[in-house]
Image (cartoon, helix red, strand yellow):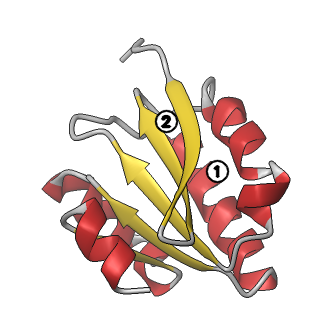
Amino acid sequence: MGKEINVSTSHIDGVAVISIHGNVTAETWKVIASAYQHDTIADSSNLLLQFEKDCYIDSGGLAFLIQIAAAGKRREQKIHASGLSEHFKKIFHMIGLTKCIHIFHSTEDAINNF
């Protein structure tokens, strides 16, 4: 699973968006952390994690996403996710991430439900 990661940030209708293209792993999470720590993202009350359709997330990547969920809770930030495969939707649910990160089928649905 050595796919390179490409992360970009944007805003859609007042929602901070981190677009993640590639695998979220113990080796690549720092790229996402850097994007999350940017003032316009971290200070936003609404955050969307927009995953690429065939994104792979290893245990290190999941641990990092748990950290983002905890940081979001401390900041009173609503976090949504879109683009996850059915497999990772189930994993998010199994480990309790869906209590803090609400999953949507599409980016549009995620944006419209803030």
- Amino acid carrying label 1: it is Phe
Q: How many marks?
A: 2
Quadrant assignment for the C terminus? bottom left
For label 1, count other residues whose C-alpha is less than 10 Å away and answer few (under 14), some (14-19) or many (20+): some
Give how far across and how far down residue 30 sits, in percent: 72, 33
User: If the image is split into quadrants, where does the N terminus sit?
Assistant: top left
Q: Which mark is residue 37?
A: none
Residue at figure coordinates x 47%, y 86% from the top left: 99
- In depth, the one of 20 and 100 nearer the eye is 20
Q: Position of residue 98 (x, y in %)?
A: 41, 79
Q: Is residue 58 visible?
A: no
> Disc 2 marks which residue?
24
| Residue type (three-letter) at the residue carrying disc 2 | Val
Closer-to-camera residue (26/34)? 34
Q: Residues within 10 Å of mark 2 (few under 14, many from 20)?
A: many
- Is residue 34 found left or right of 99 in the rendered image? right
Q: Secondary structure at mark 2?
A: loop
Q: Identify the residue position indicated by label 1 in the image.
A: 64
Q: Residue at x 64, y 50 (%)?
A: 64
Q: Is residue 86 left or right of residue 26?
A: left
User: Could you give the CA–CA distance between mark 2 and mark 1, rounded to whole angstroms?
Assistant: 9 Å
Residue at 22%, 34% in the rendered image: 54
Marks 2 and 1 in Cβ contact (< 8 Å)? yes
Give SS at disc 1. Answer: helix
Q: Which residue is pictured at 46% across the width and 43% down the height?
A: 19
Q: Is residue 20 visible?
A: yes
